[in-house]
Amino acid sequence: MAEVRPRVVINASSGMADWAVTAEGPVRLAMTAAKSGSRLVHVSSDAVFSGTRVHYDESCLPDPITPYGAAKAAAETGILLVQPDAVVARTSLIIGDGRSVHERTVHELATGARAGALFTDDVRCPVHVTDLATALIELASGESNGIHHLGGSDALSRHELGILIARRDGLDGSRLPAGLRADSTLPGPLDVRLDSRATQRRLRTTLRGGHQFLMPTA
């Protein structure tokens, strides 16, 4: 940072529940960015919310229930204390063109290459990686600061999302096993829907919903 002195830094790193990486690392980066006069855009997560109220806009305070969510929430707080003009951009499930973890899981389940299930009660607002990247660059290039939400416009369960991915990729969605996260031992919130409308009104970039960006191309 001292050598390059970048105009903008977009922090998309994560160490999951590793506190030193996910909580402390971004705050140290914010301190360094402030010293070098760099604008900071930090990518955060809907994991900062418990799902208790389901719908979350930018005014909602974090109430994490997992170590990862707690680390992300701590990073948000520290960054905005150190650099109040930074942008904290919360996002949801990130979907690409076949390369995301969720897409690979759908392919493996649909072809019988792995066991498991896609939850029908685990709801998020998936976003396409291109939309997210474009929105982050737009925020970095502007004068906005504080909390922004960058989720897609559709709330989908992981199973519904899987069906859309399978349809796009020519797979048999009926082969995707369904289950309930509430019946599993996996920790974490169930239904977290990022309300991104306030941020969307400030952006030229459209944060498409899964029904739109997962439409079959043929």
Image: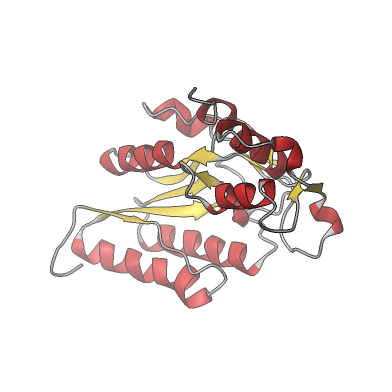
Position of residue 138 in the picture relative to residue 113 (left or right): left
Q: Residue 162: horizontal and vertical position, in percent? A: 66, 41
133 on left or right of 125: left
* Residue nearest the observer in this picture, 88 or 146: 88
Asked if 74 appears above or below 52 in the picture, the reply is: below
**Residue 182 visible in rendering:** yes
The residue sitting at 40% across, 68% down in the picture is 27
- Residue 120 horizontal/vertical position (percent): 78, 43
> Where's the N terminus, which quadrant?
bottom left
Q: Nearer the viewer, residue 116 or 196?
A: 116
Res. 4 image quadrant: bottom left
* For residue 9, side relative to residue 157 (left or right): left
Q: Residue furthest left?
A: 3
The residue depicted at 52 percent of the width and 75 percent of the height is 19
- The percent coordinates of residue 183 (x first, y second) are 86, 57
Where is residue 215 drawn, in percent x and y?
54, 26
